[in-house]
Image (cartoon, grey):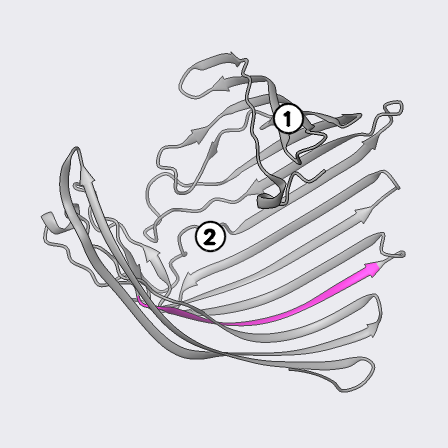
Amino acid sequence: MTYQFSEHWGATLGARHFDYEVEEFDSNTFLGAVLRVNRRVATEETGQTYKGALNYTPNEDMLIYGQWAQGFRIGRGQVQPSTCEAIGILFPGIDSDRSETLEFGIKSAWLDNRITFNAAVYQTDWDDIPVSVLLSREPTCNPVLNAGKARSQGVELELHARLTESLQLDISASTVDATLEETSSIGSKGDDLPGSADYNASVLWSTILPLGSYPSFARIDYNYVGEYFNSIEGVGTPSGDFSEVHVKLGVTVGQANVDLFVNNLTDEDRFYLGRIGHSQAFTDVSARLSYPSPHSGYQCRLSLLRIVSGALANARHRSVLSLSFFVLHSLVTGIFRQ
């Protein structure tokens, strides 16, 4: 429900009721051996969440707001892995977690909407936040457990600028401090939450290229991901702490599109959360031709060339010439419409 006090002031109030019943059956086999069959895990939850916001619009190009909102995410049953059972470690299902977020921000447009600037500062208090906890390395026992109370405080900035009719610049940056608010069996007060990088930033530069009568463009993406860990203990190989640059060039000839991609232009070594031991340290160059069918609404994509070069443990170079057709119907995906 929204109420407009005056030309410049407005307020919004909202409420949501939920009643969830989730039932899952889990089966698992390993090398032909049946480890478990149709093990039932069930979760039920009923409750309400609320939201309130106050908006101030000094003019049609600016919005200043403050809002408070509750969040809810239903828990789930958790099947006991055989590796944990083998060493006598048992753990409960994952309880539902709740959050309360307080946010203040501004959204603005300048110079006839050629420049937009948005900023927000927020604080989120989490109850029973689920985190991955390493209880044993040999054998591996790494369940998800509720970690009690946590708090996340951060700032987000966005700038979108149409510098000329053909040149676009987008910049975004964020910083966040996400930590436990109390000491428990999961961790100590002040421990960083897993998967939370302190700093992130991105810059996108795109332009329309003069290539005769053929529409063409160039795009450069820069991304920075701060360092973070996969576990609340903060041990092992950290993820993040890398920068990467991607380049894309494209041209349209008739109905055909030709695109050239260069991923990780600077050959940066990258390590990702959730991919154990997965490190990427190579540059990937590929070209693609796509052409829509004139009658059926299908699209054909031809991978012209892919060259991957760089170093993982040792320098390696390989070239792949492949012919691939991907056919998707426009009525199903809505992506490849004529």
Q: Residues within 10 Å of mark 2 (few under 14, many from 20)?
A: many
Q: Quadrant of the N terminus?
A: bottom right
Kind of residue at disc 1: Phe
Q: Residues within 10 Å of mark 1 (few under 14, many from 20)?
A: some
Kind of residue at disc 2: Ser
- The residue sitting at 18% across, 37% down in the picture is 30
User: Taken as a whole, is the magenta stretch helix, strand or loop?
Assistant: strand
The magenta-colored residue range is: 95-109
Residue 127 visible: no
In the figure, 299 relative to 159: above or below?
above
Residue 100 lies in magenta, yes or no? yes
Residue 67 visible: yes
What x and y, as percent, mark residue 284? Answer: 56, 23
- The residue sitting at 49% across, 50% down in the picture is 197
Circle 1 residue: 261
What x and y, as percent, mark residue 257? Answer: 72, 27
